Image (cartoon, rainbow, N blue to C red):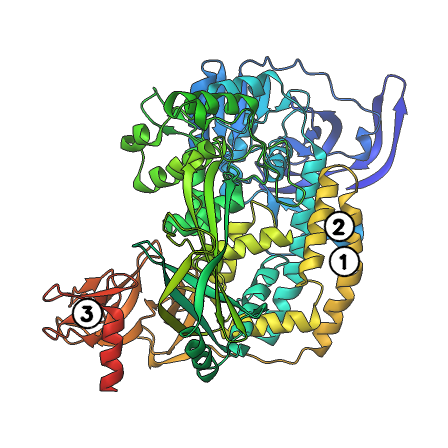
Amino acid sequence: MKWLKFSLKVGKTITCEEWTLEAYCVRCKTKREMKDPQPGYNKAGRPVTTGFCPVCGTKMTRIGATEAHVGLNPVPQPETRRNGKLVIVESPAKAKTVGRFLGKGYTVKASVGHVRDLLRSELSVDIENDFRPKYRVPNEKRAVVKEIKALAKAAEEVYLATDPDREGEAIAWHLLEAAEIDPRIAKRVVFHEITQPAIQEAFSHPRGIDMNLVNAQQGRRVLDRLVGYSLSPLLWEKVRSRLSAGRVQSVALRLVVEREREIESFVPQEYWTIQAEFLPEGLQQSFMARLVRINEQEVQLSSEAETQAVVIRLEQARYHIARIKRGERRRRPSAPFITSTLQQEASRRLGFTPRRTMMIAQQLYEGLDVGEGGATGLITYMRTDSTNVSELAQREARDYIRQVFGEAFLPPSPPHYRTRAVAAQEAHEAIRPTSVFRVPEKLKPYLTAEQFKLYQLIWQRFVASQMESAILDTLAVEVEGKYEDQVYLFRASGSSVRFPGFLVLYEEARDEDQRGGEDEENVRIPTGIQEGQLQRLMRVLPEQHFTQPPPRYTEAALVQALEEYGVGRPSTYAPILSTIQERGYVVRENKRLIPTETGRLVNDLLVQHFPEIVDIGFTARMEEDLDEIASGQRAWTEVIRAFYDSFAPQVKKAQAEIPVSKMDLEPVGRDCPQCGHPLVIRYGRYGKFISCSNFPTCRYTEPWLEKLGITCPEDGGELVIRKTRRGRVFYGCANYPQCQFTSWKRPLPVPCPACGGLLVEVNKREAQCLRCNETFLLEKIGEKTAESA
């Protein structure tokens, strides 16, 4: 385009004296210099220039502003008549439930999650321009955005009803931007449960988009992109391709690796305990007590010889009850669930992974048909860190407890629980049923087995949290023995339930690692005992122990640790655990998380060269900074700048200092049956698998089969560990599908003592033969194995 001269006259009429403009001629099928170009605007109000082809005379149009448009205003177009109300939610299931409650006059559409994100192919963050993010609508979402854009243009009002958290707020803002929704007609509505009263309340009090929440989410996204796109290429270059490092996932990996090293370096220490059985004078029932003090000193026995010397003296001592202490203990119910505690309890009780728990909870939240004339939301929003409960829900729970259990089980006033999570969003509610009168048993016919189990867990926990405390009668007995100048003190404690309270409905589960121990003893102490009463020593029971290393993390325990340290937020726990497993940094065996060699190498590299990134305290402080952005106290660009100014030099230094230690993929020892390249071991979402080293050209894969060293009882093949699609472990023959043998119970290497058949582990105490069905104690089988060895 060549501009020579143009002038403006009064009334903003353009006089084009000499200027040229090229445009495409549809008849000549080529670009030509436009004849008599005239600037103007089309019906949509966009700047265009029209003219004619100098060769064939066809009308030509070129879209876009030119210098000739300066001072011109588009001709005002009559506004399109708008009618109806458009509601945008995130999922089709949620759209169906919300649409049912809103009724006629509302069109409810689902964005199906995020509609805009940073480009995957590049950093998409303009560091020089104040970290400005470069967003793009993914190809798979363009049709969705186009449809929403068309509906929004015709709607009288547009309600952005995405989820009630920072991510939901950000999705609402991205919808506004990507679909070019007129801000004057856009309204933000938030509800924590999908029920008719909650939706009516939300739609009667709409608000604008909270840019503080949006900016907190933008800050998190940009921060994670800067870390990921800086560290991941380093790992590809120095260690192995297809690796990644993330701001929060690296901290979780560090916790797992450090726990594994604690276990490996642990040196067991021998110690002994002594228990004794006493029979009170004049009574028929005996009881057990533990030796706790010798001459006012705590018992510390470290060898068998030392213990036997004490036992000899104990057998000659005379005993009497020195003290009886009776008391009362009140046991309060646990708080209703938040995201982390739901994931932990579902893992302990139901064996669900956090990812599976959140998937099922999402279904319960979005709504299911339970015979009430359409889909109904069954629980409140499942991503929350607040134990807050609405007054309405508390009143309903108290009505239910009064009707079903009686006044005695109702506390004088509704209980309030203190939120443990750091910087919890108290405006949110705890996870609870939308109505306690939807009793799990009534809904069972309408729910899948998984949905029922999780709903029942949430329902029981919430109702129990609103009930009266349990009252326990406690009894502690101290038995004193004397032999020469030695004084021995034994102690026994027990408790009995005087009033069950919430325990009639629910009791919190605990990890196996937390069970047992002296605090958990509950000895049955005979009635009729008195202080000063003589005791007859029936037997002394010394027992050898060894100190145990700290247990490996379960997924539930790792979520608990992340929450306690203030690392991550409710929406991130499940993705963190999935990511470190999908990347092959951690494997899950028997519910325990074990780091792989790759995971150790990546962790060590990050700890050495990027100590801040994997520092728990630093990561927790970053979460606090994001919370300050959400509350409007800080600008998100300020937080990112403070981080990046120290992070960028570390990346540059690491690039120069980290040696290349390329890890070759572990070969299997066989060639690919499709292309002949060697087969190698890789890690994926479900753990180890075998694939072709020529990936991605060749995409051959096969499952990794871990052999047990046990022969299949049907065809003599090797028994191996397998997993279902949902990750459940079972055992089968390596010759599948030719051999169909499978077992949910773990096979044992010892043959059946009765018939020689295959033994499987029934529980922690017993084994059973699959051939003759006889059962045997595992300890007896272990003794026979030792004898044969």
Mark toward the start of the polypeptide (1 vs 3) = 1
Q: Residue 678: x percent and y percent?
A: 38, 79
Identify which residue, 774 or 740, lies in the foreground: 774
- Check whether the beta carbons of the residues at disc 2 and disc 1 lie within 8 A of each other: yes
Q: Nearer the viewer, residue 395 or 121?
A: 395
Mark 2–mark 1 Cα distance, whole angstroms, equals 10 Å
Q: Using residue 472 as the reference point, say whether residue 742 is left or right of it.
A: left
230, above or below 44, in the image: below
Q: Is residue 156 above or below residue 235?
A: above
Residue under circle 2?
131
Give the residue number, with chain letter if any, for mark 3. 759
Residue at 61% across, 40% down: 419
- Dot 1 surroundings within 10 Å: few (below 14), some, or many (20 or more)? some
**Residue nearest the viewer, comparing 363 with 357:** 357
**First-in-chain label (2 vs 1):** 2
Label 1 is placed on what type of residue? Tyr
Determine the residue positioned at 57% across, 69% down.
298
What kind of residue is marked 2? Phe
Q: Quadrant of the C terminus?
A: bottom left
On screen, 651 above or below 498?
Answer: below
Instruction: Give SS at disc 1.
Output: helix
Position of the N terminus, as image quadrant, is top right
Amino acid type, callout 3 = Leu
Give residue 234's position: percent from left, percent from top: 64, 70
- Which is more foreground, mark 1 or mark 3? 3
How far apart, in angstroms, are the residues tagged by discs 1 and 3? 59 Å
Q: Which mark is residue 644?
A: 1
